[in-house]
Amino acid sequence: QKEVEQNSGPLSVPEGAIASLNCTYSDRGSQSFFWYRQYSGKSPELIMFIYSNGDKEDGRFTAQLNKASQYVSLLIRDSQPSDSATYLCAVGRYGGATNKLIFGTGTLLAVQP
Amino acid sequence: DGGITQSPKYLFRKEGQNVTLSCEQNLNHDAMYWYRQDPGQGLRLIYYSQIVNDFQKGDIAEGYSVSREKKESFPLTVTSAQKNPTAFYLCASSTGTADTQYFGPGTRLTVL
């Protein structure tokens, strides 16, 4: 089992719809959760982070965290073609020999005009 | 402007050559990282450093070497022992090793 799992996609949504991206993680000791966006040929850029259970909103983006179920999701409202990219989930794991940020392999989102 | 720079943007290597990729940050971050990304794949950790003069192997360190003589700099050498080095190389930095990582623009290495 991978420590951080994402569906590779592609997830195809029509323009204006809500895109829902999901991520599950295996370590219950994880305390920080991040979403990155990576356009083709470019480096990842941070969209948002969340530390507490519940929802966190930033513009058209909402991150949702459920520690009991060990999943974190990213909702993109009013999806635009410019949102088409790979979305990487990252989970901060604390304790043990060293603290680490573990990346998922990403979900490819395609927003259809 | 604070940020991470990588150079060169594109690099071509002949078989049997060692090449060094540069990574510099002015964010005053303690931790720095090198990742490799192959087409359509996720990030794979090569090496990371938590403090100056210390670094640790990641998941795919064979054929690579690093140094951390200054807080701002974390160069990666791709040696001739790396049999399939063609990939997109990303450098990142963070305050701590479980904190937000910020990425440089990347170096695309091609073996001729």
Image (cartoon, coloured by chain):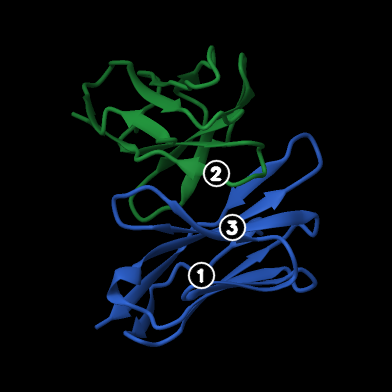
Chain colours: A blue, B green
Which residue is at the front of the view, A28 or A37? A37
Q: Are marks 2 and 3 on the same chain?
A: no
Marking on residue A34: 3
Specify whether B9 is left or right of A70: left
The residue sitting at 41% across, 53% down in the picture is B41
Mark 2 falls on what kind of element?
Answer: loop
Specify whether B53 is left or right of A113: right
Q: Is residue A67 above or below residue B44?
A: below
Crowding at dot 2, Cα within 10 Å, few <14 / some 14-19 / many 20+, comes out as many
Circle 2 is placed at which residue position? B101
The CA span between labels 2 and 1 is: 22 Å
Give the quarter of the figure containing the C terminus of chain A.
bottom left
The x, y position of residue A4, in whole percent, is 62, 58
| Amino acid of disc 2 | Gln
Marking on residue A32: none
| Amino acid of disc 3 | Phe
Q: Are marks 3 and 1 on the same chain?
A: yes
The residue sitting at 33% across, 51% down in the picture is B39
Which residue is at the front of the view, A98 or A59? A59
Marking on residue A7: 1
The CA span between labels 2 and 3 is: 9 Å
